[in-house]
Amino acid sequence: MIDPFGRAITYLRISVTDRCDFRCVYCMAENMTFLPKRDLLTLEELDRLATTFVEKGVRKLRLTGGEPLVRRNIMHLIRSLSRHLGTGALDELTITTNGSQLERFAAELADCGVKRINVSLDTLNPDKFKEITRWGNFAKVMAGIDAAQAAGIRVKLNAVALKGFNDDEIPSMLEWAHGRGMDMTLIETMPLGEIDGDRTDQYLPLSAVRAGLSERFTLTDIPYKTGGPARYVEVEETGGRLGFITPLTHNFCESCNRVRLTCTGTLYMCLGQEDAADLRTPLRASEGNELLSNAIDEAIGRKPEGHDFIIDRETRKPAVSRHMSVTGG
C-alpha cells in the first residue's frame, strides 16, 4: 500500500475499545460517554480486518485503546493474530497499555509472541499518579511492569510531558527506566478531544525538555527506529535510549507509515485529521474481502501529507473532536 506521497503503509494501529479504566486528565473528561457495545466490531471482525491489512503489506500490528486489555476476551484476538507471526507475514504484534491489567495477562501475551510493549506512565509519585489518572492504581501498574519483565517482554515507558506536573521528574524517571533496562519515550500533549482542563496550561515543548536534559546528560542522536514516530537519542550516563515524539514542535509526517483503525471499523489515515473511511460496511457486505480491500485502497489514496496540530491561547478548540482513546494515539 503506497499513499499519494510515496510512503509505504506497513503499520496498523487498532483501537480495540474506546473504554479505559483510567481517566487521564490530558486524554479524556472524567465523565465520559463511551460507545454502546453494540456498535463495536466483534473480535472475529477485527481479526478479519487486521488480516486483510497484513495480506496487503502491513508488517506491524499494535493494539491500543482506551485500554486494550479491558476488552472482554481480548486474548482470544491476540492469540488468533499471533498466527501471522508464525507464518512470517507479520514482523511484530504489540500493544500499548496503561499497565493496569498486565499482571494478569503478561505471561499469556509472551506466549502469544508479544515481545515488546509500551506502558503509559507519566509519574513515579503515587499521589501524582492518582491525580493524573484519576482512577489509576500505581501499585497495580508497578506489579504489571514486574510481571511483563518477568515474562521476558521488553517494556518501553511512554510519558506525556506536562508543564508544571512532571517536568521536574523526567530526569529521575529516565534513570529509573534505564536502570531497569527499559527505554523511555517522551510525548508532547496533543490537541485531541474536549477535556476538563486547558491544554495550553499542560503543553510542554520537548525542545525545551531536551535542552534541559542536555545540561545533565550526554544525549547522542542515533538512527534507532521501532516503526513509530519517535526520534531517539542514547543517554551516555545511563546507557539507555530516550525517544521524543514531537507532533507540535517537529512533526514526523514525512516518514509516516501508519494508519489507525477504530473498534467500530473506521479507518483514520492521519491522527490529526478528521477524514476517515468506513470499513465496517464493506466488511459486512460480503463474505469475501474484495470490497474491503478496495475500500482500503481508496482510503490509502486519500492519506494526507500531514497533520495541523496547534496549541496556543488563540487556538483553544482541539484540532479534532475525537478523544485519543478513539484512535489510540
Image: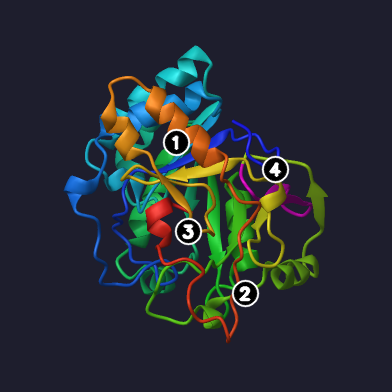
The tally of labels here is 4
Q: Position of residue 131 (x, y in %)?
A: 38, 74
Disc on the earlier residue, 2 or 1: 1
Checking the image for residue 150, the label placed there is 1
Which residue is located at x 58 percent, y 33 percent?
A: 10
* Labels 2, 3: front one: 3
Q: Which residues are magenta?
A: 228-241
Q: Which residue is mark 3?
A: 274
Left/right placement of residue 326 relative to residue 199 reads: left
| Residue type of the residue flagged with mark 4 | Phe
Q: Quadrant of the N terminus?
A: top right
Disc on the earlier residue, 1 or 4: 4
Disc on the earlier residue, 2 or 3: 2
Colour option used: rainbow
* Labels 1, 3: front one: 3
Disc on the earlier residue, 4 or 2: 4
Q: Position of residue 12 (x, y in %)?
A: 50, 38
Which residue is located at x 47 percent, y 50 percent?
A: 119
Provide the secondary structure element on which disc 1 rests: helix
Q: Which residue is mark 4?
A: 5
| Residue type of the residue flagged with mark 1 | Ala
Left/right placement of residue 55 relative to residue 76 reads: right
Label 3: few (<14), some (14–19) or many (≥20) C-alpha neighbours in 10 Å = few
Measure the C-alpha gap from mark 3 to mark 4. 19 Å
- Tell me, yes or no, whether the two marked residues, 4 and 2, touch with CB atoms within 8 Å: no
Q: Which residue is mark 2?
A: 204
| Residue type of the residue flagged with mark 2 | Leu
